[in-house]
Amino acid sequence: MSAMTDTGAGRLLGVLAAPGETFRSLAGRPTWVAPLLVLVLSATAVGWMVTARLDLAPVIRHRLEASGSQVSAEQAERSIEMAKKLAPYLALFQGLVAAPALYLVVALLLWIGCRLVGSEMSYRASLATTLHGLLPLAVGALLAIPVLWNHGAMTPEEARSGSFLISSLAAVAPAGAGPVARALLGSVDLFSLWAIVLLIIGCRIVARVSRAAAVGVVASLWLLGVAVKVALVAIAPG
């Protein structure tokens, strides 16, 4: 396994099959380009497929009616067509720009958290640890692609939930559950929990901190992420 964990591409599989050995290798020579490409491309592919199936017409009509504006049917249709044309570009922006920026921020927060508990880990090492630890999310995205391929029209609520696989508690949410409740349930996801475990292992090995400190740092970041996700869902229109 050591030959696999010593190469950038090999570490993609190594972190899933032998995380301890892979993170020990990363501690000596951090690499981040390969996992970044996998995460960005998988996120972009899923975002593009969701956008292609998103039914925006009911939402736009509802917003126009709620605003009290006197809009003709022709104007409403033009607004819908404009939204459909812009949606693919928004998906590309989210996948190719917003997602990498988010990974950089998460790595920064992990670096700060580890430094606060006494680590001397560099930001480069934190970035490598973060990106490799988040690779289970790419696994979930890749598994979601065939599901989305056969999916029909999708509501914005379905798209925001991200529950394309039966891998989170959102799959067993009651029929009347609101978007905030679904966002909370969707945060308890198999692939997210897998990523949390990998991040704890990586933080402990690469940052050279205790297991308790690693759990505290990663759990705090996860809770912060859940809070931000729920807040965005709560303020989202429509």
Image (cartoon, rainbow, N blue to C red):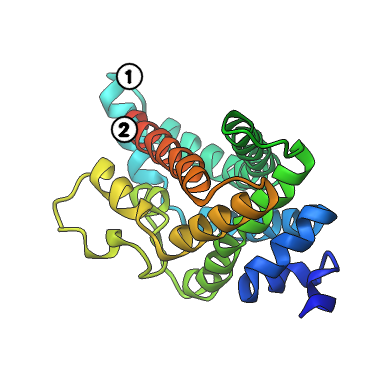
Query: Mark 2 Cα within 10 Å, few/some/many (few <14, many 20+)?
Result: some
Q: Is 181 positioned to the left or the right of 112 in the image?
A: left
The mark that comes first in sequence, 1 or 2, is 1
- 3D distance between C-alphas at marks 1 and 2: 24 Å
- Is residue 72 placed above or below 92 in the rendered structure? above
Rendered location of residue 55, percent (x, y)? 41, 52
Instruction: Residue 199: give its label.
Output: none
Whether residue 31 is visible here, answered yes or no, is no
Rendered location of residue 224, percent (x, y)? 43, 35
Q: Quadrant of residue 189?
A: bottom left
Q: Quadrant of the N terminus?
A: bottom right
- Circle 1 is placed at which residue position? 69
Q: Is 150 positioned to the left or the right of 123 in the image?
A: left
Query: Mark 1 Cα within 10 Å, few/some/many (few <14, many 20+)?
Result: few
Rendered location of residue 179, percent (x, y)? 27, 44
State the residue in front, 65 or 235: 235
Q: Is 218 positioned to the left or the right of 20 in the image?
A: left
Q: Is 108 positioned to the left or the right of 1 in the image?
A: left
Rendered location of residue 44, percent (x, y)? 64, 54
- Circle 2 is placed at which residue position? 234
Q: Nearer the viewer, mark 1 or mark 2?
A: 2
Q: Quadrant of residue 72?
A: top left
Q: Decide: marks 1, 2 in contact (CB < 8 A)?
A: no
Residue type, numbered disc 2: Ala
Q: Residue at x 33, y 36 (%)?
A: 61
- Is residue 117 placed above or below 23 in the rendered structure? above
